């Protein structure tokens, strides 16, 4: 999913895993996906509940028992791979008022409070679209405040919903830019519209996953999904070795809309570099909801051995798996569907026997798995505080990104102490290398604007559950190379 700076990327990351999408049946989620892929606009940017979205939590009293805040040690990879390396830039931070002290002041920073901004799309064509982003940053803020604040400063989140609208994103960014210390954890289909402000105000720090190319280019932007348009070969090479000649007969489908197309090109380029061959490939219109005829061609005429898709959303991928049955595809057809790591996917697929053994990979932890939380303290911390802040809500990828953005901001803030300003914060952010947020994400360098990430984890569905396979227990496989494409 990495390095595709377009408005449709968010669907490809799994729109239907969002707090909104997880509550909707698959048919409605596909319609919502189509609405976003076909564009849309909303009303004026809004702020509620003293800068928080409706239903946002207050300060949470105490940290969950047994949580670990400090950095984890690097672990040695298995199966011929190299694990992530431990070290000062790998997510270790101090926390609470005792970890650092500062009396500096700056825009949005007083002697007792630090104000951060977040502009996300939570209304518009799809209500609650990226609600997870504000939920994730609020969960982090609640955690920090329970620890005595960030270097003794209570964290306040100033949130505005851009209503999935370009002008609103511009206005919200400009309006908050003179009030907040930094922007942290935003998630918007129109973040490129607010990027002009950051280009003109290079003194304002911005930490978020950029979706549009313009949003990723300012020197004061620091990203969790870094790099150039392209993809890594490591996971493709793994399946080449594991599956042999089967990868020479692959069928694929993708959304033939906007950024899904260059994303698909990146996947294919990396896969072909690893020895894959695609016998069948077709781009789908955003409104399509049945692919049985495609699978008839793939299975009965092309005799594919592997079906791969990720340039779509998880609801569509689930329907595709069921369409394989309708088309009479052989039972031994191998499905490799990275986009399927989604809390709603298993429900959408239903009782199809093709669910067993379905394969994929992530460039982040299995963040909603209980077994993953038992292995990675940061994932346990995230799950615990998200559940405290938003009881009953599903933790989704946008929430994870926002949480990890907050943790990166925290690291740089603490490292800049006692002389914390916007400038010294960005100085510290530029020093960060191979950051993994204590293992919650594959290692990345926030300032990297040319290369890409080559670390990942592999997973397989067994007995209705996602689980790691051939991975370091709590780390990442780091191999292969990053293949850049021109779009």
Image: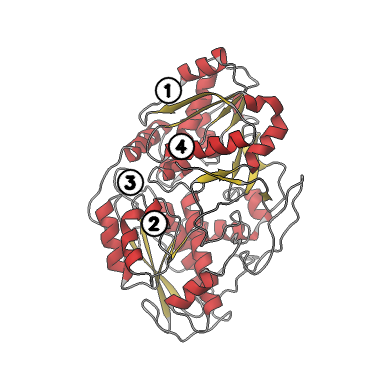
Q: Which residue lies under the disc numbered 4?
A: 313
Q: Which residue lies under the disc numbered 3?
A: 127
Q: Position of residue 22 (x, y in %)?
A: 44, 42
Give the CA distance from mark 2 to mark 1: 35 Å
Q: Position of residue 84 (x, y in %)?
A: 68, 57
Looking at the image, which residue sits at the far top? 300
Give the CA distance from mark 4 to mark 3: 17 Å
Which mark is nearer the camera, 4 or 2? Answer: 2
Looking at the image, which residue sits at the far left? 43
Quarter in which the C terminus is drawn: top left
Q: Residues within 10 Å of mark 2 (few under 14, many from 20)?
A: many
Give the CA distance from mark 2 to mark 3: 23 Å
Give the CA distance from mark 4 to mark 1: 14 Å
Q: Position of residue 467 (x, y in %)?
A: 66, 42
Would you place residue 64 above or below residue 102 in this image?
above
Q: Quadrant of residue 355?
A: top right
Give the CA distance from mark 3 to mark 1: 25 Å
Q: Position of residue 397 (x, y in %)?
A: 50, 50
Q: Which residue lies under the disc numbered 1?
A: 290
Q: Using residue 241 as the reference point, say whether residue 41 is left or right of it.
A: left
- Report helix, strand or loop for mark 1: loop
Residue at image x 49%, y 31%? Answer: 317
Pointer 4 and pointer 3: residues touching (CB < 8 Å)? no
Would you place residue 56 above or below residue 463 in this image?
below
Q: Which residue lies under the disc numbered 2?
A: 215
Q: Earlier in the sequence, mark 2 or mark 1?
A: 2
Which mark is nearer the camera, 3 or 1? Answer: 1
């Amino acid at each position: 999913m990495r390095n595709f700076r377009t408005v449709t990327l968010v669907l490809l990351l799994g729109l239907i895993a969002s707090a909104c999408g997880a509550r909707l049946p698959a048919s409605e989620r596909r319609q919502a996906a189509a609405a976003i892929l076909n564009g849309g606009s909303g009303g004026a940017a809004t702020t509620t509940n003293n800068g928080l979205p409706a239903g946002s939590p207050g300060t949470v009293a105490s940290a969950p028992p047994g949580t670990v805040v400090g950095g984890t040690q690097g672990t040695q990879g298995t199966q011929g791979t190299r694990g992530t390396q431990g070290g000062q830039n790998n997510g270790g931070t101090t926390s609470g008022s005792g970890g650092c002290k500062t009396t500096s002041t700056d825009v949005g920073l007083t002697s007792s409070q630090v104000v951060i901004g977040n502009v996300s799309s939570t209304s518009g064509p799809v209500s609650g679209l990226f609600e997870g982003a504000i939920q994730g940053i609020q969960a982090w803020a609640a955690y920090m405040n329970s620890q005595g604040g960030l270097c003794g400063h209570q964290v306040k989140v100033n949130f505005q919903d851009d209503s999935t609208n370009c002008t609103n994103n511009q206005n919200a960014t400009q309006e908050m830019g003179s009030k907040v210390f930094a922007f942290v954890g935003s998630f918007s289909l129109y973040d490129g519209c607010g990027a002009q402000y950051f280009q003109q105000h290079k003194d304002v720090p911005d930490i978020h996953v950029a979706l549009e190319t313009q949003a990723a280019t300012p020197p004061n932007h620091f990203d969790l999904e870094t790099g150039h348009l392209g993809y890594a070969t490591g996971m493709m090479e793994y399946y080449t070795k594991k599956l042999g000649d089967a990868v020479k007969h692959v069928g694929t489908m993708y959304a033939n809309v906007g950024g899904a197309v260059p994303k698909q090109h990146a996947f294919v380029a990396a896969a072909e570099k690893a020895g894959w061959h695609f016998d069948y490939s077709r781009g789908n219109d955003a409104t399509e909801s049945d692919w049985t005829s495609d699978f008839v061609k793939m299975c009965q005429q092309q005799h594919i051995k592997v079906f791969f898709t990720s340039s779509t959303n998880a609801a569509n991928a689930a329907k595709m798996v069921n369409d394989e049955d309708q088309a009479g595809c052989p039972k031994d057809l191998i499905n490799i569907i990275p986009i399927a790591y989604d809390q709603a996917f298993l429900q959408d697929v239903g009782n199809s026997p093709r669910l067993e053994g379905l394969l994929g990979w992530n460039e982040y932890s299995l963040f909603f798995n209980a077994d993953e939380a038992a292995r990675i303290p940061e994932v346990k911390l995230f799950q615990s505080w998200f559940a405290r802040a938003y009881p009953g809500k599903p933790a989704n990828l946008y929430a994870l990104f926002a949480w990890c953005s907050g943790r990166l901001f925290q690291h740089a803030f603490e490292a800049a102490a006692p002389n914390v300003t916007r400038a010294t914060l960005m100085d510290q952010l530029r020093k960060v290398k191979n950051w993994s947020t204590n293992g919650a994400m594959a290692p990345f360098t926030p300032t990297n604007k040319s290369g890409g990430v080559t670390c990942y984890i592999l997973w397989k569905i067994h007995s209705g559950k996602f689980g790691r396979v051939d991975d370091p227990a709590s780390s990442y496989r780091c191999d292969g190379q990053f293949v850049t494409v021109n779009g």
